[in-house]
Every structure is written in structure tokens, then in C-alpha cells.
Image (cartoon, helix red, strand yellow):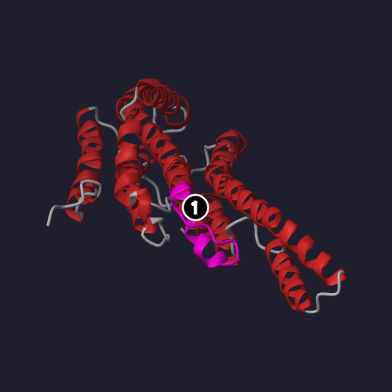
Amino acid sequence: MTADPVQKRVWPLWKYVLLIVSVSGSYVGHALIFDLPILAGGSEAIVPLQTGMWAALMTSFLCVLAHWTAHATEVRVFQMLGQLPFQEDKGGIDQIRADWLAFSAQGPHRRRRRIMLIGGVVSGLLFATIAIGMTIDVDTVMDRVISAGWFGIVLPPLFGYTSMHVYTNVVSNNFVMRAAVDATDIDILRPQRQIAFAQLALRNGLGWIVALTVTLLLTLGDQVSTVGMMPLILGAMALIILSFFGPMQIIHQKLVAVKTAELERLAPMIAAARNAVERGDDSAGNRLAGLISWRQAVADAKEWPTDAGTILRLFLYLAIPIGGWVGSAFVEALLEPFF
């Protein structure tokens, strides 16, 4: 049996562990060469790692999460497609995959990927020099420059890679969502069939959530301004919400179209049955009552493929970055009097 080429992009666990060790180890080597502190000095230290070493460790986790979410999300998306009732003449998952690969090879898509790559590299450079370089607790300005130099080399390509793949996942999910909607038998009176679309939309935000969570942990410390982090937090939250409602809008439009078409189909049938009743056709009464009940059921059908569980998961996803950041800061403040 031929291995799934999408699944093959997800590394085994040992490779991710090796990546963490390699990235964080490179900072250790950098610190040893330039005589930078690795462990935090003083009895008041909660985490026995110097700020630069902590940020380097979080950077290594960000490398792993960036790679894992870039490919594992795509795997999960195609697994979710298996839950959908595809029309037999549409080709199913294989056709959608082939169409996506053809689309991703087109020039406009590749150009947008390059733009996201460049934007991520610039953002990583700014983040390394401002957010990291200005907060590392070192003795001299030169030590700050040397310490920030490692982040200036590592973060730009990492941010570029993450931005490019988050963009690709969003575009991929939107493309796949539209193709799946077109190839699926939409039954507005069976809303559970549409829940897979909502779950598919939720996958869009995971890349942004992971990136934001670890980025916030990168800058955890007393020297980091909470106010200064708010634009990053609010911007990332907006992207997470948009990445969810973008594909949801696609299935919403389809549900509205199917619902409208069904109501329009029922309208002349109800009018004909009503005219028959008015002409004294007693047998038309039951048919009219059934048609009216059917129209009411269609009119009451949901136009968004969501349930309570989907909405709850969305809010939980949104709480992950803020909860991780605030929770870590709270624990640090809580433990500080005892150390």
C-alpha cells in the first residue's frame, strides 16, 4: 500500500525531539562562545534559566509546533473529509486533493506564499531585535547585541516559515471547504452532517493559536510591557476569528442557497394544494398539511453548521494563548514570595 504523501510530511516524534535539542543547543553553544549567562543567578529566580536561554527554549518549541501544525493540520483536514457524504460523480477526496495540488502550483498562489514568507522574515527580525533584544537581562549593551544576534538569525526564517504555512493552511482549507461543499449532498434537515464543516473550519485557527501562544511565552517576564504586547494579541485574535468564519461563510452560503431553493420549490406545490382544497378536493387537505409542515421544517433549518460543542471549542482555542501567558505570569507572581 502506497503511503499517503501528505501523511509522510509529518515527522516521527524523535525528529521533533532532535529539532528541540538542536535549536536550544545551538543557543547554548552561542552563549558559551560569547560568555553569556545560561542559568539565572540569585535566589529570587523562579525558573533557573536566564531570559535569553528561556526564550531560546521557547523558540525551539515554536520550531516544532510550526512544522507539526503546517502538515498535521492538512492530514486532519483530509481525514475529516471522509465524514462527508460525497456525490458519486464528483470524484471524492482524491479529486479534491488533485484540484488543490493543481491550484497550489499556480503563479498567484506561489507569489502570495513568497509575500507571506518575506513578511514573516521581516516580522521575525523586528521581534528579535525589539521584543527579545530589548528585554534580555545582560550586563552590557554589547552582551545584549550578542545575545540578540542568535535570535536575529533564528527567528526571521522561523517566522517566515510559520507565516507562509499558516497562510497556505488557511487558503488550503478555504479551497477544500469550497470543493467539499460543491461535491457534497447538502441535507439541511440533517444538521449533524454539516458539523464536519465546522470542525474543518476550526482547524484554520490552530496555526495562529500555536504561534501566538509560544510567542507570548517567549516574552514572559517582568521586563515585558503588557501594553506593548496588546497589538500582537489583538491582531492574532482577529486572524484566528477570521480564519474560522471565512470557511464557515462558504458552507453558510450553500445552506442558505439550498434552503431558498427548497422553499421556492415548495411554494407552487402548496399553492396548488390550497387551490385544490378550495375547489372541494378533500384528498388535497392532507397533502396541503404535509407540505406546510415540510415548509416549516425547512424554514426552521439551521443556516450555520455549528453546535454548542463547536462554539465552545472555538472559545477554548481563543483562551489558550491568553490563558497560557496570564497563567504563567500569575504562577510566577504567586511563587515569588517563597523564593
Residue sitting at the far left: 1
The residue positioned 36% from the left and 29% from the top of the image is: 160
Q: Work out whether residue 189 or residue 194 is closer to the camera in this orientation and state it.
A: 189
In percent of width and height, residue 325 lies at 51, 50
Residue 338 seen anywhere in this rendered image of the structure: no
In the image, residue 77 sits, relative to residue 280, either above or below, namely above
The image quarter containing residue 175 is top left
Residue 196 drawn in magenta: yes
Residue 263 drawn in magenta: no
Residue 177 seen anywhere in this rendered image of the structure: yes
In percent of width and height, residue 261 lies at 65, 52
Q: How many marks?
A: 1
In percent of width and height, residue 78 lies at 34, 52
Q: In this view, does 223 lie to the left or right of 108?
A: right
Q: Is the magenta stretch mostly helix, strand or loop?
A: helix
In the image, residue 59 sits, relative to residue 322, either above or below, namely above
Query: Helix, strand or loop at disc 1?
Result: helix
The image quarter containing residue 108 is top left
Q: Work out whether residue 313 or residue 125 is closer to the camera in this orientation and state it.
A: 313
Q: Give the range drawn in magenta.
A: 180-197
Q: In this view, does 175 lie to the left or right of 2?
A: right
The residue positioned 59% from the left and 64% from the top of the image is: 307
Q: Name the residue under label 1.
A: 202
Which quarter of the image is occupied by the N terminus?
A: bottom left
Q: What crowding class fits label 1: few (fewer than 14 Cα within 10 Å), some (14-19), or many (20 or more)?
A: many
The residue positioned 33% from the left and 49% from the top of the image is: 91
Q: Which amino acid does label 1 sit on?
A: Leu
The image quarter containing residue 104 is top left
In percent of width and height, residue 63 lies at 31, 41
Q: Work out whether residue 283 or residue 18 is closer to the camera in this orientation and state it.
A: 283
